[in-house]
Image (tube, rainbow, N blue to C red):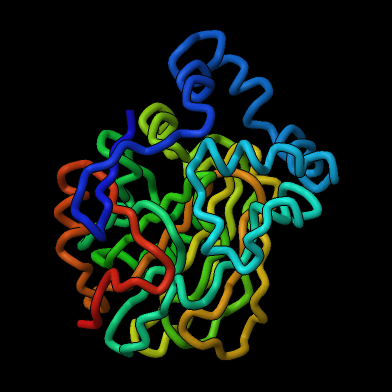
Amino acid sequence: MIYYIDRKTGAKKEEIVAGGRYLRWMHETKIGSSMLEILIKKKFLSVIYGKIQDLPISRRKIPSFIKELDIDMREAENEDPSSYKNFNEFFIRRLKKEVRPICMDEKVFASPVDGRVMAYENIHAKNVLQIKGQEYCLEELLGNKGLAEEYQDGACITVRLSPADYHRFHFPDEGVPEPSTKIAGGYYSVNPIALRKITSLYCQNKREFTVFDSYNFGKVLMVEVGATFVGSIIQTFHPNQAVKKGDEKGYFKFGGSTVILFLQPNRIKIDRDLIENTQQGIETKVYVGEKIGIKR
């Protein structure tokens, strides 16, 4: 079972895991692990699956998906499930602005995405925590030693999205984003079941990163990591053009995914509840626009 802290109530909740039995088979049995390496993690399977979600027939599964994962369609700009042309159009649905208010205080670092947070301060760039018991190297994640070294002793905020979450991601501050860098890789699940089993998973998956020259928090590194059946990572921003806090950066097509944020030393003080929950090995649910740290 996977638990997280509901930040609004402070309650510990069990996550509804889509395909949980399948994930455990894939990572905890010999046959499943073999299938994962031979077939499931491969690009072509996720690409094919993603294309199927673009077909009109895929819309048939929208009602059951909403029911199984308890999705509140009152938050969506388009509340009517039957009006979506296909599953991917539903999956990347936009939300009403009022349900994700952006904290505009310039001292506040806002969450760029809905998801479950693990947060770390004073990180070692060669040993960044993926999850308790697993680490990865920032240079390997980026393929850029010089850039990785800029975040030594800085902060790392990892936000994991489940399939039930809103799958568009946004800018946490105003500033100017540089062009994205794409890095090819596999398509492992980013669920904690997989994170505990696969060493340096984030460094093995398809990913994209953007250096965001934030006006209030310095050079923020934003990394989007693909996952099993994530057909695409779509960037919708315009490089080298100023953005406002909360502006859309892009979105993930079908699947659970992850956004990782790196900040340089002495730029941010992450909210204590996020740090304390992380130290206890439990994620905290946050939403787009919500305060997750403050300017040092």
> Quarter of the image containing the C terminus?
bottom left
In the rendered structure, the answer to whether residue 14 lies left or right of residue 211 reads: left
Q: Nearer the viewer, residue 177 or 117?
A: 117
- 113 up-or-down from 110: above or below: above
Q: Nearer the viewer, residue 74 or 251?
A: 74
Residue 14's quadrant in the figure? top left
Confirm whether residue 143 shows in the render: no
Q: Position of residue 261 (x, y in %)?
A: 40, 64
Question: Which residue is situated farthest in the right direction here?
Answer: 56
In the rendered structure, the answer to whether residue 284 lies left or right of residue 81 reads: left
Residue 270's quadrant in the figure? bottom left
Residue shown at 47% from the left, 57% from the top? 259
In the rendered structure, the answer to whether residue 38 lies left or right of residue 279 reads: right
Q: Nearer the viewer, residue 104 or 10?
A: 10
- 242 up-or-down from 248: above or below: below
Confirm whether residue 81 shows in the render: yes
Residue shown at 48% from the left, 66% from the top? 222
Number of numbered labels in the structure image? 0
In the rendered structure, the answer to whether residue 21 lies left or right of residue 270 reads: right
Q: Position of residue 225 (x, y in %)?
A: 54, 51
Q: Position of residue 172 (x, y in %)?
A: 42, 76
Q: Position of residue 208 (x, y in %)?
A: 59, 59
> Quarter of the image containing the N terminus?
top left
Residue shown at 59% from the left, 43% from the top? 255
Residue 83's quadrant in the figure? bottom right
Residue shown at 43% from the left, 50% from the top? 160
- 172 up-or-down from 7: above or below: below
